[in-house]
Image (cartoon, rainbow, N blue to C red):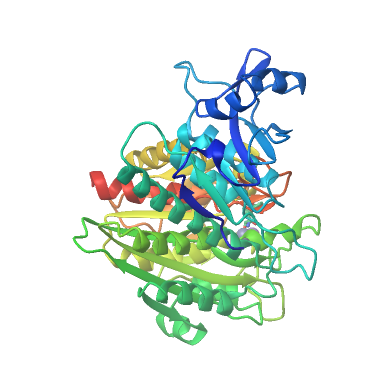
């Protein structure tokens, strides 16, 4: 998709020659009240916009869209009133509420060519990100009949801050939203077209467009260097695995950050095959990889004063005569051995190799993300990622995830689960012999491969990476791009505070 062009409005948006004007509504008791920024639009309705909204049953709740024809009162033909939900105890709405309302409005605007928004006066960053992400659509595989895209959105400037501040916010928020869209595009591309080699090519092309260093290891190089986890998982497919490394070296880099993301381009489960129902959703099993690729490219675009290296293992988990099997022992990169008890616990195997490789760069932090366990979805649902790792950094990442609106919750790595990963013959097994705490057990497995003392966070995004349900806020059906905004915010935080 091509993102709409966003600009700060030079004239009052109520006078803008656009197709639609977006205003916010706030839930107040059972009725809707207008959000700040909508005064001029209300004046065009002789101060009766709230009354009109009430007559139409508007409540201001989140995801509510009410359209009102202007009948010549404004240049725009329609006012789109987007619900922000209830204000907080301080009477204010959050950036995430603005992001979601802007997203819902942008989805409702598909078919319009141009719009103006007053939600940006409430929160500019939220309005920019919500508008770009809500307008996102993935049409590469439709042969006909796609609606015209929203091409241009004017944003009313917030009262506080200078024009220079606003321009900087617009630029950064646009880059962040485009990075999320890049991750979504990768995840939404079907597995017959996005497989390890083609995924590596696309990652390399993105990185090279910004002049970043790229290294791609193919199956021969992986074998030579001993990447037993990636090869073990990947050999069952006719599409052989890859390891991609992308490095951005910012000027005056304060810290070195390693990013690792799970890149299973399709997960059938392998010989321990998955049931047929919903298996198509395993096209999203490279959501972590897509997010870290988009994030390192974003770090370069926004010139963060950091060194960031994304280490991305890519494989397709298939059953075949060449596939790895339960009972096999793999020798991972770095020499640890793993007994395979279930070939469907494949993500941790490719990640273990990548984590050991990433550790060789001597990073200050490691952020790793993966669609790793069904247990994450059982425990936390579809909108809250599970964050594990070293205590302090885990809590920092979880707090930042919530601040971005993506959602995240700190989860423990219980010591006693380690013994459940003991193997009859190898250093460890890839699964415990039971179902309990499966999200945590996967984290405990990964911890075995993280260098001693390195602050690290493991973000399990099995639920949040992909929206199999109805669209909401700025997320349509399919890929969400989670956790790109969290990673971007953690990188910005490290750049600022070390
Ligand atoms: N890719 C799946 C996890 C997953 C499940 C992602 C649902 C998104 C939605 C992963 O490779 C997997 O199969 N995990 C197993 C692990 C088990 C065998 C220990 C699981 O969670 O069932
Ligand atoms: Mn699996
Ligand atoms: Zn998987």
Res. 473 in view: no
Specify the quadrant that holds the N terminus.
bottom right
Which quarter of the figure has residue 138? bottom right
Residue nearest the viewer, comparing 323 with 97: 97
| Residue found at x 52% / y 51% | 442
Res. 110 in view: yes
Which quarter of the figure has residue 296? bottom left
- 303 lies left or right of 14: left
| Residue found at x 42% / y 72% | 207
In which quadrant of this rendering is ligand 2 seen? Answer: bottom right
Residue nearest the viewer, comparing 144 with 72: 72
- 112 lies left or right of 485: right
In the image, residue 150 lies at what x, y percent? Answer: 63, 54
Residue nearest the viewer, comparing 51 with 146: 51
In the image, residue 239 lies at what x, y percent? Answer: 63, 80
Residue nearest the viewer, comparing 104 with 265: 104
The furthest residue to the top = 29
- 82 lies left or right of 339: right
| Residue found at x 72% / y 77% | 320
- 258 lies left or right of 437: left
Q: With respect to residue 171, does 49 lie above or below?
A: above
């Amino acid at each position: 998709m091509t993102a709409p062009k966003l600009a700060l409005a030079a004239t009052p948006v109520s006078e803008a020659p656009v197709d639609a004007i977006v205003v916010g509504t706030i839930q107040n008791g059972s009725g809707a009240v207008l959000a700040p920024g909508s005064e001029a639009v209300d004046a065009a309705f002789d101060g009766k916009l709230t009354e009109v909204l009430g007559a139409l049953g508007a409540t201001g709740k989140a995801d509510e869209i009410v359209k009102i024809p202007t009948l010549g009162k404004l240049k725009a033909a329609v006012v789109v009133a987007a619900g922000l939900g209830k204000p907080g105890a301080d009477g204010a709405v959050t950036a995430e509420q603005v992001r979601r309302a802007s997203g819902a409005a942008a989805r409702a605007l598909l078919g319009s060519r141009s719009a103006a928004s007053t939600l940006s006066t409430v929160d500019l960053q939220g309005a920019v990100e919500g508008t770009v992400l809500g307008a996102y659509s993935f049409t590469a595989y439709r042969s006909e009949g796609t609606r015209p895209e929203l091409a241009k959105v004017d944003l009313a400037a917030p009262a506080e801050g200078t024009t220079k501040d606003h321009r900087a916010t617009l630029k950064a928020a646009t880059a962040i939203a485009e990075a999320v869209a890049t991750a979504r595009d990768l995840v939404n591309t079907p597995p017959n077209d996005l497989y390890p080699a083609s995924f590596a090519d696309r990652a390399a092309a993105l990185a090279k467009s910004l002049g970043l260093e790229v290294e791609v290891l193919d199956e021969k190089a992986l074998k030579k260097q001993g990447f037993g986890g990636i090869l073990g998982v990947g050999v069952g497919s006719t599409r052989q695995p890859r390891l991609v490394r992308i490095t951005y070296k910012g000027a005056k880099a304060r810290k070195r950050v390693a990013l690792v993301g799970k890149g299973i381009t399709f997960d059938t489960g392998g010989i321990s095959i998955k049931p047929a129902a919903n298996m198509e959703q395993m096209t999203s099993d490279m959501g972590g990889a897509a997010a870290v690729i988009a994030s390192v490219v974003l770090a370069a675009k926004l010139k963060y004063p950091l060194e960031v290296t994304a280490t991305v293992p890519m494989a397709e988990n298939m059953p075949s005569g060449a596939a790895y099997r339960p009972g096999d022992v793999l020798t991972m990169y770095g020499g640890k051995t793993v007994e395979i008890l279930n070939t469907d616990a494949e993500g941790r195997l490719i990640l273990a190799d990548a984590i050991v490789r990433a550790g060789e760069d001597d990073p200050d932090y490691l952020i790793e993300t993966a669609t790793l366990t069904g247990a994450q979805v059982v425990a936390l649902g579809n909108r809250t990622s599970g964050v594990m790792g070293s205590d302090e950094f885990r809590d920092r990442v979880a707090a930042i995830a919530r601040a971005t609106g993506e959602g995240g919750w700190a989860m423990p790595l219980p010591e006693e689960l380690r013994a459940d990963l003991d193997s009859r013959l190898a250093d460890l097994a890839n699964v415990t012999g039971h179902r309990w705490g499966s999200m945590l057990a996967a984290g405990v497995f990964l911890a075995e491969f993280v260098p001693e003392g390195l602050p690290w966070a493991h973000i399990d995004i099995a639920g949040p990476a992909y929206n199999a349900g109805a669209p909401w806020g700025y997320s349509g059906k399919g890929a969400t791009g989670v956790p790109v905004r969290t990673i971007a915010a953690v990188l910005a935080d490290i750049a600022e505070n070390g």
